[in-house]
Amino acid sequence: MSVSSIPSAQEIVRFAPEIALSLGGTFVMLGEAGLKNGSRARLAVMAFLTLLAAAVLAVFVAADPGTAFSNLLVVDGFSTFFRVLVCAAGMLVVLISTNYLRVEGHDSGEYYALILFSVAGQCLMAASNELIMLFIGLECSSIASYVLAGYLRDDRRNNEAALKYFLLGSFASAFFLYGVAWLWGALGTTNLSEVRRLLLDPSAGVDATMTAAAAALLLVGLAFKVSAAPFQMWAPDVYQGAPAPVAAFLSVGPKAAAFAMFLRILMTAFVPARGQWEPVLWTVALATMVIGNFAALHQTNVKRLLAYSSIAHAGYILVALTAMSDTGAAAAMFYLAAYTFMNIGAFAVVTYVAGRGERHVELMDFSGLSRRSPAMAAVLSIFLLSLTGVPLTAGFFGKFYIFKAALDADLVWLAVLGLLNSAVAAYYYLRIIVMMYMHEPSAGAGALPSPGVGIRWALAASVAGTFVLGVAPSLVLDFATASAPLLR
Amino acid sequence: MDVLLFLIFAAIAVGCALNLVLQTHPISSALSLIGVMGSLAVLYLLLGGEFLAAVQLIVYAGAIMVLFVFVIMLLNAGGEKKPSKKVLRTAVALPLLFTLAGVAAYVLASQAPRTETVKFGAYVAGPYEVGKALFTTWLLPFEVTSILILIAILGAVVLARKEI
């Protein structure tokens, strides 16, 4: 009876970023109900400041690393990295959303509250060391995302996206939870460090079949959440149908958090079973890259094209996971940071060009963009070049470290096939650039309105991030390399 | 006796679950779901989880299912229209399904160890134990679940209210 039920102050401090985000979300929600129409614009500012505060708190609590709440949470370099990353993604999305929501006539606080709650769930996913806790974080993030995907309730495309995402997403969550139950049945624990200890201990008498079945079920849930083949079908439909800023959010926030979860489950718990995981991950990574890239070649809708491109990028990150090494984990972390900036940037330009009611999201609408808005065409080119992996941009070093990690782990064929895939990807990214610079604007395409303050700042930050990571990758990579071994 | 009860109620649970999916009218599906919940409660009871069994009956078979039935009646949902039968698809899908189930069952049956079987009634899980676990070791998930429910309520309000 000596177990104290009252958590110590230190434990609560380690949970501070999530507390800040939940409180901020609640206040924004209440503000929507209590404030007059004129002062609603402040809610976006409040959401932005909450995310900023959470990111600062995450860095602040990292000064005193350790576990909390009976080993359910762990604050280490890895969790800090992803907490800051998802908060940064949230901030960029808030910036590109304000103008969009005003134009669509749906500028309300619930949107920002849902973003805050979703980010809180993602922070929890990054910092959990236990499967039940991971699952609850995943659900917080997912349920908020389902609603966000259908936020413009009167738009049929939104309804379709939300319904598809909700049905398939709940199904995938159920698979994950079923896997947790199997693991509990096989090992009697859901704590990842404990799972590792039992797998390493030959005298523990671990039932290999049950554990493998549990791992397979967990993999199904995780593969869905990172949109890896063969569970990638939802991504194009959802990204195409959801509001453009929400698509930007879905393609980075929940995905980065899901990869954080994937990395932690893989590197903390299942490294002893490396032999069984490797062929499965190898196949999934290759299939994801091939399906994403080849399907993207024929797309005419830019949002759908970026959705397939994000599937392909998930494939590259899975290559790093297949290596199951410290360098692989660090490469995946770096890639996710680079991907956050370049992908949100690309979606921000699409949000801007799409205009009211998202009428201009076809590839044709981008032809001659360099005449209509030279600055936008230039920044979109930067993001697309970075997604291709051109030197001096973040994407180059991202791919470089991933394929280097694959080669270090003797995955020569996977690295070669991955490189060939990124050559294929160059075609569809360059096609957009050619459209913007070499084609005339289509008849009837008028001048674009001046972009809002939010989008300008978001684009400036994304461009800066893309170049900083492309010129001085060691800023982030050193931190990632230092924190990857902590996963063990 | 325990094994017999287990087999009976496990079979009822699986049967009701199948019926749930196969029925075309939502009310029939909801009633089948009550059957699943009820038989699960008996299985918990067999394992010694008296509290869990009671909660399962009161919360799931009772409260939540009543809400389900209310909603179905409010929406006045009729029977679902049967899509035209695709004979070829059924002819291919059914054997594949049985093959998959057979292979899975075979692998599990042949590889799972037989050294230890479940002991009926061996798990002590009364209100005291459940409460203690919930408020000590599992305090954080318990509290965060309240945030999860708040998100779900907020989402429902966003999607359902009259004007945005």
Image: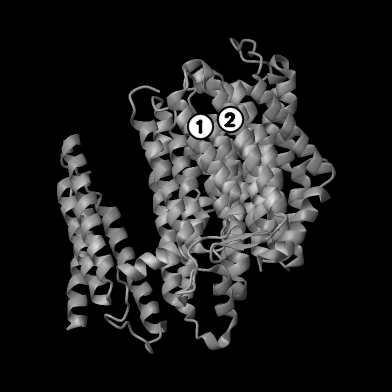
Q: Which residue is mark 1?
A: A28
Q: Are marks 2 and 1 on the same chain?
A: yes
B111 with respect to A349 (left or right): left
Check if mark 2's residue and mark 1's residue have beta carbons within 8 Å.
yes
Q: CA distance from mark 2 to mark 1?
A: 7 Å
Q: Position of residue B141 (x, y in %)?
A: 46, 57
Local crowd size for mark 2, using a 10 Å CA cut-off: few (<14), some (14–19), many (≥20): some
Q: Residue at x 47, y 81 (%)?
A: A207
**Disc 2 chain ID:** A
Kindly identify the amino acid type of the residue bearing the numbered disc 2. Answer: Met
At x 53%, y 19%, the residue is A39
Check disc 1 and give the amino acid type.
Answer: Val
Task: Name the residue nearer the viewer: A385 or B88.
Answer: A385
Residue B140: tell me if it is visible. Answer: yes
- Looking at the image, is B122 positioned above or below residue A322? below
Compared to A128, does B150 lie above or below? above
Q: Chain of mark 1?
A: A
Q: Which residue is mark 2?
A: A46
Rendered image quadrant of residue A444: top right
What residue appears at the point 15 percent right and 47 percent down from the top-left corner? B27
Residue B79 percent coordinates (x, y)? 16, 42
Instruction: State the count of labels.
Output: 2
SS for callout 1: helix
From the viewer's perspective, is residue B48 above or below residue A343?
below
| Disc 2, SS | helix
What colour scheme has been applied to the protein in the rendered image?
Answer: one colour
Quadrant for the C terminus of chain B in the image: top left
Callout 1: 10 Å neighbours few (<14), some, many (20+)?
many
Among numbered discs 2 and 1, the one appearing first in the sequence: 1
- Image vertical order of residue A330 relative to residue A232, above or below: below
